[in-house]
C-alpha cells in the first residue's frame, strides 16, 4: 500500500507499506518534494517498492492499496495494466473519511458527540491506572483487550 502526506518541513512524502501476518512494515518512504506529483512518478515508486518487497521480504505482492485521488487512481490503472495479477483497491479509510465528513457536516449534534467521545478518550489515555483497569476488566471475560485510539485525518 502507499500513502502520501507532507511532513512538518512541508516535504512531500509517499510511504510504501507491507502488511504480512497481521503486522505492517514500512518498505520505503520517498521524498518527492523535487518531483511532480504524477501517476507516472507514483507508478515508478510502486514498481520499485514491489521489487524491493520481493527481494527483501521474499513475498509476492498480491494487492496494492492507495488513496482515491486522481494521480493514485491513474497509477492504479497503469499498475493493473502492467501487472494484471495484482489487485488494486482504493483505501477505505480515505473513503470513510469522506462519507463521515459529509455526515458530520449535516448535524452539529453528531459533531458535539464526536468531540465528547474524543475528549473522553484523551482523558483516559492520560490516566494510565484507569486505562490499566479498563484493559484488566476486559481480559477477565476472556476477551482480548480493546485499544483506545484517537482519530487522525487520512
Image (cartoon, rainbow, N blue to C red):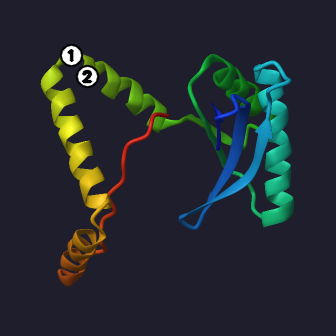
Q: Which residue is mark 1?
A: 106
Which is more toward the observer, 56 or 5?
Answer: 5
Local packing at callout 2 (Cα closer than 10 Å; few below 14, some 14-19, many 20+) is: few
Q: Are marks 2 and 1 in contact (CB under 8 Å)?
A: yes
Q: Residue at x 85, y 24 (%)?
A: 34
Residue 56: x percent and y percent? 83, 63
Local packing at callout 1 (Cα closer than 10 Å; few below 14, some 14-19, many 20+) is: few
Which is more toward the observer, 141 or 153?
Answer: 153
Decide if residue 33 is in sight here. yes
Q: Quadrant of residue 111?
A: top left
Q: Which residue is mark 2?
A: 103
Left or right for 11, reference 132:
right
Which is more toward the observer, 122 or 58?
Answer: 122
Residue 57: x percent and y percent? 78, 65
Left or right for 94, reference 46:
left
**Tag 1's secondary structure?**
helix
Q: How many marks?
A: 2
Residue 3: x percent and y percent? 63, 37
In space, the residues marked 2 and 1 are separated at their CA atoms by: 5 Å
Above-or-below relation of 81 to 131: above
Decide if residue 58 is in sight here. no
Residue 38: x percent and y percent? 77, 19
Q: Residue at x 77, y 29 (%)?
A: 42
Q: Quadrant of residue 39?
A: top right
Amino acid at each position: 500500500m502507499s500513502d502520501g502526506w507532507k511532513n512538518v518541513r512541508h516535504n512531500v512524502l509517499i510511504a510504501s507499506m507491507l502488511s504480512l501476518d497481521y503486522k505492517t512494515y514500512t518498505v520505503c518512504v520517498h521524498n518527492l518534494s523535487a518531483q511532480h506529483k504524477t501517476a507516472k512518478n507514483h507508478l515508478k515508486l510502486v514498481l520499485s517498492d514491489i521489487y524491493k518487497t520481493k527481494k527483501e521480504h521474499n513475498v509476492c505482492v498480491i494487492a496494492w492499496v492507495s488513496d482515491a485521488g486522481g494521480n493514485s487512481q491513474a497509477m492504479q490503472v497503469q499498475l493493473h495494466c502492467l501487472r494484471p495479477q495484482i489487485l488494486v483497491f482504493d483505501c477505505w479509510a480515505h473513503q470513510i473519511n469522506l462519507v463521515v465528513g459529509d455526515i458530520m457536516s449535516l448535524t452539529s449534534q453528531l459533531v458535539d458527540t464526536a468531540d465528547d467521545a474524543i475528549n473522553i478518550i484523551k482523558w483516559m489515555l492520560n490516566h494510565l491506572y484507569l486505562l490499566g483497569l479498563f484493559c484488566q476488566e476486559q481480559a477477565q471475560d476472556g476477551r482480548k483487550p480493546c485499544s483506545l485510539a484517537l482519530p487522525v485525518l487520512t
